[in-house]
Amino acid sequence: MERYSEITNKNQREIVLLKGFPCAWGKCSFCDYILDNSTSKEEINEINFEVLEKISGKYKVLEVINSGSCFELPKETLEKIKEIVVEKKIEKLFLESHWCYKNKVKKMREFFGIPIIFKIGVESFDYEFRNEFLNKNAKFKTIEELKEYFDSPCMMVGIKGQTKEMIDKDIDIVINNFTHATINVFINNSSKLKRDDELVKWFIDKYNYLDQNPNIEVLYNNTDFGVGE
């Protein structure tokens, strides 16, 4: 499992994949990523502290991810991250959270005291597809409601059951409403959902220009950020 990497093309930054407590929701129909967790605080902190020591601060930007939300990281790990932010003079942080923690986002921003790009797994702006088909439990009704808490939606494309029209609408919303977004091309995993290869090919052909958009990061494979396995 790779837990430290550098993103050197768009939005240059260091990135660490930490271990956390189990995902509070943990029922998304497409996800098997949440298996990278533990109920042992000691084990989590030991792994995380070792990974965090690799941060150099060379880009002054750091992204911290784990198999769920940043709020599922132990207090000791969060304090260690804050120490490193100060020590390495980090000027901007990327964090991620599930919608269920929306009311804690403000406190986390205050805790770190530097600009944070808060990511959220939206997957699709189609309410029914997001919450019934993908079982995301992110029940915001408007883009304005989402932006009240979060800065950067993480989208999913290429799942059987998704349509071109859904993707077109999602990309339009992302481009016109957010200064940063991540688009994940679905890769078959141990979940029951399957990749739609024709839909993926269509997406890549139509939206390859997004590779040149400095504000949108398209992940064609789960490990494109250099972490994971």
Image: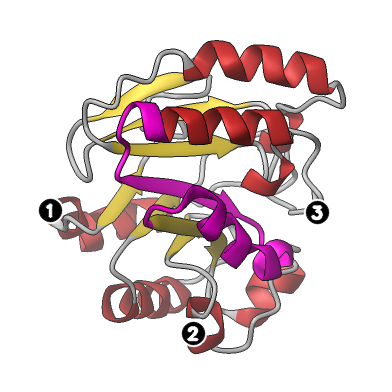
Q: Nearer the viewer, mark 1 or mark 3?
A: 3
SS at mark 2 in the image: helix
Q: For the point 81% across and 50% down, which residue is it?
A: 24
Residue at mark 1: 212
Quadrant of the rendered structure where residue 172 is? bottom left
The image's colouring method is: secondary structure
Distance between mark 1 and mark 2 Cα atoms: 25 Å
SS at mark 1 in the image: helix
Q: Residues within 10 Å of mark 2 (few under 14, many from 20)?
A: few
Residue 86's spot in the image, x, y percent? 39, 34
Residue 24 appears left or right of 190: right
Answer whether labels 1 and 3 touch (C-beta < 8 Å): no
The numbered dot on residue 25 is 3
Q: Say if the magenta span includes residue 108.
A: yes
Up-down relation of residue 82 to residue 57 (above or below): below
Quadrant of the rendered structure where residue 165 is? bottom left
Q: Say if the magenta span includes residue 167.
A: no
Answer whether labels 1 and 2 touch (C-beta < 8 Å): no
Q: Say what amino acid the circle numbered 3 marks.
A: Trp
Q: Residue furthest right?
A: 39
Residue 98's spot in the image, x, y percent? 66, 58
Residue 24 appears left or right of 7: right
Residue at mark 2: 143
